[in-house]
Image (tube, helix red, strand yellow):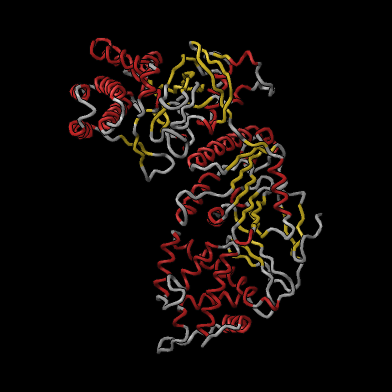
Amino acid sequence: MLAPRSAVARLFTVSNLWPGSVVCLIAAPRTCPVTQTGATWQTYQVPEQYDPGEIADDLAVCRQRGLDWLDRKTTNQVPVSAAALQQLAEDYTEAKALVSTGRVDQIKALLRDGIGEFSRQGHPADAGLLRDLFFGDSMDGPIKPPGELLKKAREKSGDAEARFRERRTNVMRSFAQFLIAFAAPQHAEHKQLTITTGYVGDTEHFIQLLADAVNVTIVGITNERLAPMLEEALRRKRASGRPDGFWGSLRIVFLERSQLKFVNDERVEFLDTDGALLQREREWTEARRSIRVFLKRAHSTRWTLYDYPYIPTVTGSIFEFNDQRKKIVHLLIKRPRQSRADQRYIELEDLEDQYFSALFEDIVHNSVPLTLIVPVGFLAGDTFQCTEFRRHADVLKDRSRSSGWLPAVLVVTFRRRDGHVEPVLQVRTEENSGRELDRVSHLSGHIFRADFELPAGLPLADELRSFGPEHVIPVRTARRVVREVIAIDPVLGLRSAGTGKYLYPDKEHLFFFIFTLELQEGIHFPRRAEMHPFPLSELLAIRASQALRSAARLCQTTEIPRRAWNSAAEIVALNLFLHDYDDLGERILGSDARHSDELARISTIINQHVSERTSRISVSTSREAEVTGLAGWQYREFFSELMPLYAQIGIDDAGDLLRNIADNGHKRAASDRLAELYHNDDVMASIAIEL
């Protein structure tokens, strides 16, 4: 048992709960009983002379009549009594020495001040709803009719009618308890302690805390549902402030992978122990990946991910606000094998001696930062030689002028169905990728320093930092990438298919170890993976539009050296030749970078040929994403490397496409010359735009 931390609350860690569970015992006389209000329970210390139930009823009646019409008397209406609320307002007016001409003004003053304080004490969303219901946009002037306020509040909330009615009732009850303690503090013998509890599945409150907080620390197990909540919170933060706003500090702690087998969660209820662990590991992997992708896309460095190598003492979050360095503790209460729908949280302001802050800091201090490290080196044929390591966050930065090669893997996935063989590619979205969004790509990923580790955790010897396509390092990396994205272990299904190079003009280059993987028919992919079959005809159409866009972009980019422009024009024209746009290719080859009017006319003609390609996004069937092209290496090496590999696999029509090119001298020469240019260091270094 912990020593008492204040005169109001004593906190005990309960050993028979899931690790991290906490129960609060309130040691204070004359406290209001815990009142169930749907998804939220709240306890406030309030004077006995006030009845929270009566105050809540009066609030509801006043809301329904409208504050400006409380004293209206007609043939169909009598003045609203609201005796309990009126008495509370009179006491508040007297205690604050306010000047008020009548009970309506007194009630208005009480509600205005109470709503403001309710927001400052960690309930901004509920306070906003109360403000909309009672005042709308007129906190000081005439108030709109109650029916109009109700309609606008309902539309603003975005909730269904039944959910909105339930939330409105819950907020009124919670506010009634708060309002009594706020309005008549002189009657309370002890400092007020506010403890809020609710269901974990109701995420709105948590998201608003994230949006309002300055500094946040989150300690979780898998954090599998955190990414979309972070995204929405950052959207709100930026919508109400600076467009580049971010948290002053955001720290997210995961349970270390080796500890996941000791977790006793709801998955065990429906699966065997091994199956539950496998599902837990998949969620853990996907959460780390999606959170990292989102945070990198947020363009801030004020975040850190951690691994915690022990079962944490608590799980939850601590939020720090600008308001006098106020800290709110949000703790999760989990029982063994309890479903997520039944999981609860408790929330309170940190104790005077900052006990919880110290507890969270201790967890972070004993965690290991998840800093991804990538090898950098040079090439010797199909072999990569590692010479140094760099932080993943510091590589592939535009205009960095950094040198060296970064090793990566590319897994060409395909499947057989009804006698046909078709490639399966990923649509890269904000949910699953950090770069080349709205492109289609086979599975790819960097080789990291962690991939150099042997299963026992021992690092590879220095002499083994040189590796080729068959080496254990790229094979292990390819297996990891497949497991992370589509949640299957390829085991022995991976086949090495050589290597590939991708040259950048202004940063490190990429060296791909290429593998093939046949997927079993009927496999179901995680939705966020966005894995879809693409007939070869569709890929050709996508690439043709991409080549046209590149040509139009070049025609609009005239402020580059003449030699570089000529090289770029040749690359663009060769791509157009391969897609049967010979006339456009010849016009670009015959144009001059100095003649902007002529280039503008060519660009207009090119854009008329672009065909938009769309692909439905599985995770949100209400929207479609435009597919703007193929990812880097697959676009450049489509005819020279990818098609021969497709033909070898047996992809439908790939062999016919290659034979057509081989039989057409013009296209064969274009394909050979294009491959030569894409592999020329000097040429690619001189071209500052993507081609």
Quarter residue 146 falls in: bottom left
Q: What is the x, y in percent for residue 600?
A: 20, 34
The residue nearer to you, when weighing 317 against 653, is: 317
In front of the other: 272 or 385: 385
**Quadrant in which the C terminus appears:** top left
Q: Quadrant of the N terminus?
A: bottom right
Residue at the image point whose x is 73% and y is 74% from the top: 30
Q: Please provide percent x and percent y for residue 276.
A: 62, 36
Q: Is residue 674 left or right of residue 101?
A: left
Q: Using the image, determine if residue 178 lies above or below residue 197.
A: below
> From where the camera sits, is residue 525 visible?
yes
Return the residue nearer the eye: 264 or 113: 113
Residue found 55% across the figure and 69% down from its top: 116
Location of residue 674 by image quarter: top left
Could one spot residue 18 in this view of the protein? no
- Where's residue 563, x and y in %? 29, 21
Q: Residue at x 58, y 67 (%)?
A: 118
Instruction: Point out residue 362 in the picture as x, y percentages from the top left corner.
Output: 72, 45
Number of disc labels = 0
